[in-house]
Amino acid sequence: PVSRMRAVFQLAPLLRPGLRRRVMCAVSSLNSSESDASVPLTSIQGADVKAFRDSLRLYRRCRAMPPGEFSTKLQRSLDVLVDAYRLYGPRGVTSSFNGGKDAVACLHLQRAALAGYCTDFRAEKSPVQVWRVEAIFFIIDDEFPEVREFVETVADAHDLALDRLQCGWIEGLRSRIPETNPESGLVASRAFVLGTRAGDPNAAGQQHFGPSSSWMPPFMRVNPIIDWNFAEVWEFLRGFDLPYCSLYDKGYTSLGKRADTMPNPALRRDDGTYAPAYMLDCSELERAGRHNAAVHAPNKGKDSNTMNNGVRAEDPKILKVRKNAVKQQCQDTQLLGTFTNGQG
């Protein structure tokens, strides 16, 4: 295995970046339990070596998944997260962990990618540095106790460096981003991993990477599962036997606050009980149990020929600017939900 890996690393510069990473990871997965176990580990800031090895095993299993449509998406998600770590480093990438299914999938992908990055992209003959996954959790009123309990259980099981924030989300983000020194010529920034999917309300146009809006603190949105659908989230969680919040087994398919969330009516059985979330056949009904599932577009004014604030529909240039502004506002609202528990 060592000779095979050495040959691949020597040939790697001749390959395209994406293909190079895939080949390196595929070869690394061969006899991985033996080769990974022989590599010396250095714990950084008290990181748990056992939790790291578990994450590395998950990374190898994901990389060894047989080819297929979902496997292609899974590999791309890991590539995105590894790239995030290459750009921002182990302490510069933070998981926005709210306990929802999408955030849970992202967290497991992130801990796997961190272990893979630390192992496969280290300097030659150097020990593997063991880092903890950085994560934030916003404490909100009217939270499901099951969600809070699950978040704490996951944080303990996977040795997360979890920062529990009880403040506004903008204030919370600023607390995680170091101040920029104007004289340095460099902007201090961070990357936040979000569970946004293309099917989420107002997520249209988002990609795997995207900078924050100009009025926000400077950070990079990282959306590793942006191209996943509802069924694929469950394929990943259940296929790799990964834990998730118990509410999903009670018919909840999207979690928010207790006041606006109920079990999905589409999963109600004849006896009054509910089937688990992964049994939902129609993904369009994912948020049928949410009372405020959509962000509404602005209403029209009294004059049917005008938009809000007196901007006339027949002025295409002004209308285009306004539509872009409304789209950005909706995406910012979507971002708020991803950081707290508005989606998932």
Image (spheres, helix red, strand yellow):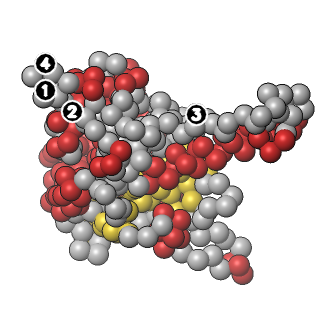
Q: Residues within 10 Å of mark 4 (few under 14, many from 20)?
A: few
Mark earlier in primary sequence (3, 1): 3
Please tell me whether mark 3 or mark 1 is closer to you in this view.
Answer: 1
Q: Amino acid at mark 3?
A: Ala
Which mark is first along the chain, 2 or 3?
3
Write the residue at 64% across / 69% down: 187
Rounded to the nearest angstrom, the CA distance separating label 3 from label 1 is 36 Å
What's under tag 1, amino acid-wise? Answer: Gly
Q: Is residue 111 left or right of residue 36?
A: right
Residue of label 1 = 272
The kind of secondary structure element at disc 2 is loop
Mark 1 or mark 2, which has the lower sequence index? 2
Furthest toward the left, the residue is 271
The three-letter code of the residue at mark 2 reads: Gly
Q: Which residue is mark 2?
A: 251
Give the residue drawn at x 77%, y 41%.
Answer: 308
Q: Are marks 3 and 1 in contact (CB under 8 Å)?
A: no
Q: Under tag 3, what secondary structure?
A: loop
Neighbour tally class for label 2: few under 14, some 14-19, many 20 plus, Cα within 10 Å:
many
Q: From the top left corner, tell me how far across and down residue 90 is, in percent.
A: 40, 62
Asked whether residue 112 appears in the rendered view, the answer is no
Quick one: 28 or 56, which is closer to the camera?
Answer: 56
Q: Which mark is residue 270?
A: 4
Whole-angstrom CA distance, mark 3 to mark 2, is 27 Å
- Asked if residue 145 shows in the view, the reply is yes
Image marks 1 and 4: residues in contact by CB distance under 8 Å: yes
Quadrant for the C terminus, please: top left
